[in-house]
Image: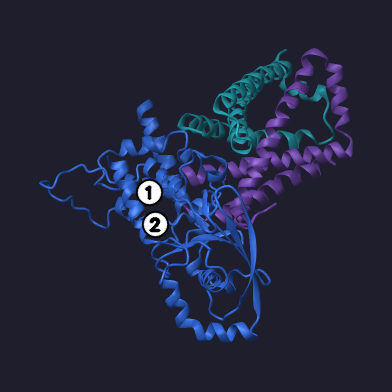
Chain colours: A purple, B cyan, C blue
C-alpha cells in the first residue's frame, strides 16, 4: 500500500533499492551452492544448468539481472549524492538508474533467447 | 546503523562497482548459446585473475549483504541489536564460507 | 544544564502556541469575522466530508463532519469551523495562522502539512478531507501530537549553542560570503514544525533515529564558526540513531514547507563523518 507521503520518485527509488537488495541477498547462498557443485558433483551442476533452458527460469534470470543492475545503478546514485559535490538532480539520476537497469537486463534477455 | 557499519557498507559497495559491471558483462556474453559447466570451468579454472576477481567479490558481497540484511531486519522487523548482530555475523561468515567454496570449485585446477 | 535549558526554552515557545480546547478567543474572533460568510455558506453551498481523528494516547478513530466549502479556505479554517460550530471538545494546535510559528502541522489526506498554509482546493480528494495528528509522534488528544520526542532528539543531536567565548572576547567576524556561512544559511530557516519528521519513513521504522530536522540543525552547527567543537557535533550524529540511518528517501525535502533541504544536510553530515574517520585512521 503506497501512502500519500510516499508517492514520489525518490521514495520509489528507495523501495526498488531495498527490494532488489533483499532479493539478491536471499539469492546469494543459492548461487554459491550451485557453483560449488562443480567441486563435488560436476554432473549435477550440468543438470542444473540444463534446467536454465526452461523459459520460466530464463525469465527469472532476467529478473535477477534486472535487480542486480537496478541495485548497482541505484547504489551509484546514492554514493554520488552522499559523497560527491552536491547536485540537485536526484530525480533525473533515479530515472537514469532505472532505465539503465532496464537496458542492461533487456540486453541480457535478448542474448538469452 | 552506526558509522562503522556505514563505512563498511559504502566501501564494500565501491569495491563492487567495477566487479558488478564486469559480472553483468560476463553474464550477457556467456549466456549466448546457453551455459554449460564445461564452458564456465574452461574460462575460470586455473586462472589467477578470476580467482582474485571472485575472491574479492565474495568477501565484499558478504559484508555488504550482511549489513543490508541487518538494516532490513532492524527497520522492518524491529529485532533487538544483539539478535541483529548475531544474524549479521552468521550470515556474513556463512556467505564467505559458501562463496569461498564456490570460488575454489570454479577456479581451482 | 544546557539540555534542560534548551528544553524549557522550547516548551516556553510552544506554550505560546495555543492548545485549543474551546476557550481561546482567537478562533472566536476569526469566526466572528467570517460569520456572515459562514452562515450564508451553510445554507446553500456545496459541502465536503471531513474525517477528523478523535482520540487520545491509547486509542481513537475518525469522526466525519459535513463542512461547507468556501472558495478561499485553508485546512486550519476547516478544523476551526468544526470546533466552533460542531464540537467544542475538538483539540488542535495553532498560533500564528500565517506560516510563521510551525505549530499547526497535521497530516492532511496522508501527507504532513502546515494546515494554515494549505488550501482545501489543493488537497481535497473528491469531496473528502482527512485530518490527523502528525505522524511518528505520540498523540495527546485528537489533532494534538506530543512534540517532546521531536524536541528531545533536537537536543540529542547537539541542537543548542555551546559557547566557546566569553562576553569579554571579541565577536568573531563572519562574512556572509564565506562558503561555510552560505551553507549554514541554507538551513537556518527551520522553525521546528516537525513536518519532515512526520514525512520520514526511517523515523517511523527506527525509534532511535534523530530525524531530518535535528540532523539538519547539526549540519548548521558544523558550518558555524562560532561553534568551537565540530568534532563533538560529528560525534553526536555518528551514533546508533545518527545520520547514517538515512536512506535518502527525500520525503523531508519534498514536504518541508519552508523549502529547506534536510536530505542534502544529512548527506553533508555523512561525508563529513567519513572524512573525519579517514583522517583519524590515516
For image coordinates 40% across by 37% down, the residue present is C273
Is C119 drawn above or below residue C163 in the view shown?
below
The reply to whether residue A85 is visible in this rendering is no
Lower position in the chain sequence, tag 2 or tag 1:
2
Q: Residues within 10 Å of mark 1 (few under 14, many from 20)?
A: many
For image coordinates 52% across by 42% down, the residue present is A79
Counting from the top left corner in percent of width and height, residue C176 is at 26, 58
Q: Is residue B98 left or right of residue B70?
A: right
Is B16 drawn above or below residue A34 in the view shown?
below
Is C88 drawn above or below residue B37 in the view shown?
below
Residue at which label 2 appears: C190
For image coordinates 26% across by 43% down, the residue present is C162
- Of residue B12 and residue A6, the one placed in the foreground of this image is A6
- Circle 2 chain: C
Quick check: marks 2 and 1 in contact, CB under 8 Å? yes
| Disc ID at residue C217 | 1
Amino acid at each position: 500500500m503506497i501512502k500519500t507521503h510516499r508517492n514520489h520518485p525518490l521514495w520509489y527509488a528507495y523501495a526498488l533499492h531495498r527490494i532488489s537488495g533483499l532479493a539478491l541477498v536471499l539469492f546469494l547462498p543459492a548461487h554459491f551452492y550451485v557453483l560449488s557443485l562443480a567441486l563435488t558433483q560436476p554432473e549435477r551442476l550440468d543438470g542444473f544448468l540444463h534446467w536454465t533452458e526452461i523459459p520460466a527460469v530464463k525469465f527469472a534470470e532476467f529478473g535477477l539481472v534486472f535487480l542486480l543492475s537496478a541495485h548497482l545503478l541505484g547504489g551509484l546514485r546514492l554514493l554520488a549524492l552522499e559523497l560527491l559535490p552536491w547536485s540537485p538532480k536526484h530525480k533525473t539520476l533515479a530515472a537514469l538508474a532505472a532505465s539503465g537497469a532496464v537496458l542492461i537486463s533487456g540486453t541480457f534477455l535478448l542474448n538469452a533467447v | 546503523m552506526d558509522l562503522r557499519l556505514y563505512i563498511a557498507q559504502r566501501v564494500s559497495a565501491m569495491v563492487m562497482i567495477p566487479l558488478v559491471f564486469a559480472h553483468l558483462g560476463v553474464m550477457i556474453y556467456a549466456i549466448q548459446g546457453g551455459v554449460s559447466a564445461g564452458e564456465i570451468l574452461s574460462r575460470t579454472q586455473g586462472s589467477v585473475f578470476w580467482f582474485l576477481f571472485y575472491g574479492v567479490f565474495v568477501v565484499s558481497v558478504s559484508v555488504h549483504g550482511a549489513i543490508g540484511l541487518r538494516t532490513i531486519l532492524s527497520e522492518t522487523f524491529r529485532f533487538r541489536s544483539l539478535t541483529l548482530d548475531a544474524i549479521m555475523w552468521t550470515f556474513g561468515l556463512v556467505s564467505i564460507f559458501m562463496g569461498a567454496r564456490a570460488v575454489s570449485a570454479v577456479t581451482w585446477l | 544544564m544546557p539540555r534542560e535549558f534548551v528544553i524549557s526554552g522550547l516548551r516556553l515557545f510552544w506554550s505560546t502556541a495555543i492548545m485549543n480546547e474551546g476557550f481561546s478567543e482567537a478562533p472566536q474572533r476569526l469566526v466572528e469575522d467570517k460569520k456572515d460568510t459562514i452562515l450564508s455558506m451553510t445554507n446553500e453551498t456545496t459541502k465536503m466530508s471531513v474525517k477528523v481523528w478523535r482520540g487520545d494516547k491509547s486509542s481513537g478513530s475518525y469522526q466525519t463532519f459535513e463542512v461547507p466549502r468556501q472558495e478561499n479556505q485553508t485546512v486550519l479554517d476547516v478544523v476551526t469551523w468544526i470546533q466552533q460550530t460542531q464540537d467544542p471538545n475538538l483539540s488542535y494546535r495553532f498560533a500564528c495562522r500565517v506560516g510563521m510559528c510551525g505549530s499547526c502541522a497535521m497530516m492532511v489526506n496522508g501527507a504532513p502539512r502546515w494546515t494554515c498554509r494549505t488550501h482545501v482546493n489543493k488537497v481535497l480528494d473528491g469531496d473528502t478531507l482527512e485530518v490527523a495528528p502528525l505522524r511518528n509522534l505520540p498523540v495527546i488528544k485528537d489533532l494534538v501530537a506530543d512534540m517532546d520526542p521531536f524536541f528531545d532528539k533536537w537536543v540529542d543531536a547537539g541542537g543548542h549553542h555551546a559557547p566557546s567565548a566569553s562576553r569579554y572576547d571579541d565577536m568573531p567576524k563572519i562574512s556572509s560570503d564565506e562558503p561555510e556561512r552560505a551553507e549554514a544559511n541554507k538551513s537556518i530557516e527551520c522553525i521546528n514544525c516537525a513536518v519532515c519528521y512526520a514525512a520520514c519513513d526511517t523515523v517511523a521504522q527506527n525509534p532511535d533515529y534523530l530525524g531530518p530536522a535535528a540532523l539538519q540543525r547539526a549540519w548548521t552547527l558544523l558550518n558555524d564558526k562560532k561553534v568551537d567543537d565540530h568534532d563533538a557535533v560529528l560525534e553526536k550524529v555518528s551514533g546508533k540513531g545518527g545520520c547514517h540511518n538515512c536512506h535518502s528517501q527525500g520525503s523531508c525535502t519534498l514536504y518541508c514547507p519552508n523549502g529547506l533541504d534536510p536530505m542534502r544536510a544529512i548527506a553533508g553530515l555523512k561525508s563529513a563523518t567519513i572524512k573525519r574517520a579517514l583522517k583519524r585512521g590515516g
